[in-house]
Amino acid sequence: MGGQSMRVLVIEDDKETAQFLQKSLKENGHTADLAGDGESGLSLAEEGAYDVLIVDRMLPRLDGLSVIKTLRTKGNRTPVLILSALGEVDDRVKGLRAGGDDYLTKPYAYSELLARVEALGRRAVPEEQQTRYVVGDLVLDRLSHRVMRGGEQILLQPREYRLLEYLMQHAGQVVTRTMLLEHVWDYHFDPQTNVIDVHISRLRSKIDKSFDKPLLHTVRGAGYTVRDGPV
Amino acid sequence: MTALFERLAKFFSTSAFRLAVMAVALFLVLAAMLAGVLFWQTNKVLTEQVLTVLRAESDVLKAEAASGRGALVAAIAARSRPEGPALYFLADSTGAKLAGNLNRVPPELAGSSDGGVFRYKPDGGAGAAERLAVAIPVETGDGLRLLIGRDIEDQRQFADTVRNVSLTGFGALSILGLLGGLAISRMILNRMDVINQTSQSIIAGNLSRRIPIDGSGGELDDLARNLNDMLDRIEGLMVSLREVSDNIAHDLKTPLTRLRNSAEAALRDARGEDAYREGLERTIEKADDLIKTFNSLLLIARLEAAPLEESLEQFDLSRMVEDVSELYIPAAEESGFALAVDVGQGPLVRANRQLIGQVVANLIDNAIKYSQGQGCGSSISVSAGPGPGTDGGAFISVADRGPGISENDRQRVLKRFVRLEESRTKPGTGLGLSLVAAVARLHGGELKIEDNQPGLRVTVVLPERIVMRSGAARAAPIAMAGAE
């Protein structure tokens, strides 16, 4: 999984959680530093050049949202993933308003956290302006809204197009179902059943069915990825 | 005795009593000033009057003196009566008395040339009491010395009476003021005692106690009413909190036990690594279900406890319902349902988009889950728009052709964790509809469960106040799926 290696700062007061994250991120090829409270987290974040910050909301000495606000007022734009036990209704809005880039409610699956951290780390590289996404022989042209594979045009519904666009924007990375629901549909609620899977299988039947090499892969227990090559 | 003393001390220390005493004291000072000024002024006017009379008489006597010593002596002798307010003393240059009803120059006026106040004993009565008088000298020339005066003992006695009456009055007023202060403070203190006793009883855990309202309609009644309303609200929140924790304790036990069993079974499985992996995956799956249930519970509790502010957005309700339906169309088709979406234009509402989205998702998910495999019923219709009546507001409705819910059970299914017998085998937390109801309530709306003949129709009715701009119903239903 993954892509390039990232430097991550985990600001989390629960030692066990922090060490679990450090160990797991290391296994996925990233390096992670730990800070146990808001103040030391803030000074570490200001000194070190990190690709992503993981900030717990409730921290001793200085709470997570204040850490983020302070960083943002000082011009530090490092992407921040907020972790919170408060995940309801208004909390998410408050978190993102404070300057967070993504919000994950505890308890979470590690695969979900990893996918989001990697997506955030990528964001630091300015590729949003890219007008064409290419994976293998699949091409998505963002200007003409056309999708071609092997020189043949593929007709997609508007929603299928946006699904593919998001997947190809994060080509090579794992994208979870929740991330798709959030970014393609803009919903943060629990859809109860796996509604996303059916959308994916319809998209897959259009882009992969009549070709030898599949590009849209399912990553078991985590989500989906678009890549040219083995998962 | 000490009890009485303590009670008195308590009265004296009440703010009502202090206020009453302060008011009385201020009143007394003002009254004393007023009485003093009046008394002083009256005295002055009366004295002036006496002096004016004396000066006029002095002019008359001067005229008599001009016509000779004999005439003056005769005039004085004629005016001098032993009893009466007019006093005279005429002496020659040696100081021997020539005429008059005073026997000598009063010692108080001996050295004075302006006259003044003095005391004297009237003639004839050796035992008579001294009386107060005022006198002025009259310039007669001729070496004579003449004093004319007036008795002012009556005036002095009148002044004394006024002073005594005033002092008695002030005394009575002070006592009455003090008693009034005590009475008022006692009244307030009694009400306060009741409020304090009730508060202490509530602090001690007796949450159902309320402060009695005596119907006098005063501020204390208002205070009592407000405190009672506050207590009602707090008690309501406590009850719903307790319900949630009871539910958590009760209903999370089962899935927790299952989780534990699954882990234990995997551990005992002798097939080795693959079995362990399988068991762990199963355990994580069960843990995820548990988390889902837990989150739904917390969400419902939070929705019931606190209003939303931060997360309200404006959006087109019909567009949004269409959008969520679209999310479900492939999944519905996979399960053999045609999802018909019939929405109008708008209305534009101000609400929590995520929660309303969750409502639509839960309703569609329920419809798919509970009418699956029912043979006849393979269509689900979703509608939204202004209405349902003409009174403003908006509605979202999801109807299926499944088994429906019998009339008796319709209220029951809104309760947390209630799953009707027939549905126990299906997956789910049993919180879907209660969450829908909570979201509806939070937005000031309500949830209606009706017979779709056959099937179930669940309608969320949202009130007019969340509607920013009303919309229009679409003329003909448009099937969005199932037609391919």
Image: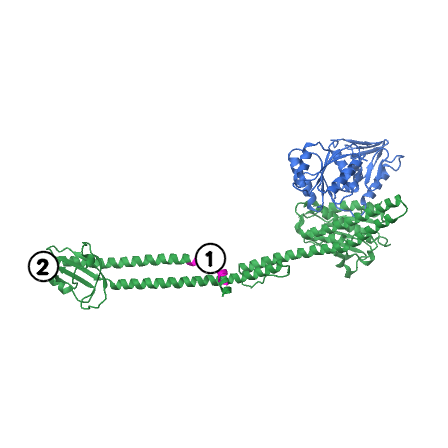
Helix, strand or loop for the magenta stretch, by majority: helix
Looking at marks 2 and 1 on the same chain, the residue that comes earlier in the sequence is marked by 1
Image x and y of residue B251, in percent: 77, 55
Q: In which quarter of the image is residue B211?
A: bottom right
Camera-side residue: B354 or B344? B354
Quarter occupied by the C terminus of chain B: top right
Q: Residues within 10 Å of mark 2 (few under 14, many from 20)?
A: some
Q: What element carries label 1?
A: helix
User: In the rendered structure, which amino acid carries the disc numbered 2?
Assistant: Arg
Q: Give how far apart the Cα atoms at labels 2 and 1 are.
A: 72 Å
Instruction: Count residues near mark 1 (Cα–Cα under 10 Å), then give few for <14, some for 14-19, many for 20+.
Output: some
Residue B19 has which mark? 1
Closer to the camera in the image, A31 or A177:
A31
Q: Mark 2 lies on which chain?
A: B
Q: Which residue is drawn at 80% across and 54% down?
A: B254
SS under mark 2 = helix
Q: In which quarter of the image is residue A167?
A: top right
Using the image, tell me which numbered label, if any, was put on residue A104: none
Colour assigned to chain B in the rendering is: green
Residue at (44% x, 62% y) in the render: B178
**Residue assigned mark 2:** B69
Q: Does the magenta stretch include residue B20?
A: yes
Q: Which chain carries label 1?
A: B
Chain with colour blue in the figure: A
The location of residue B114, given as percent across then percent down, is: 20, 54
In the rendered image, residues at marks 2 and 1 fall on the same chain: yes
In the image, B272: left or right of B194? right
For the residues carrying marks 2 and 1, which lies nearer the camera in this image?
1
Name which residue type carries label 1: Leu
Q: Position of residue A96 (x, y in %)?
A: 69, 40
Magenta region: which residues? B7-24
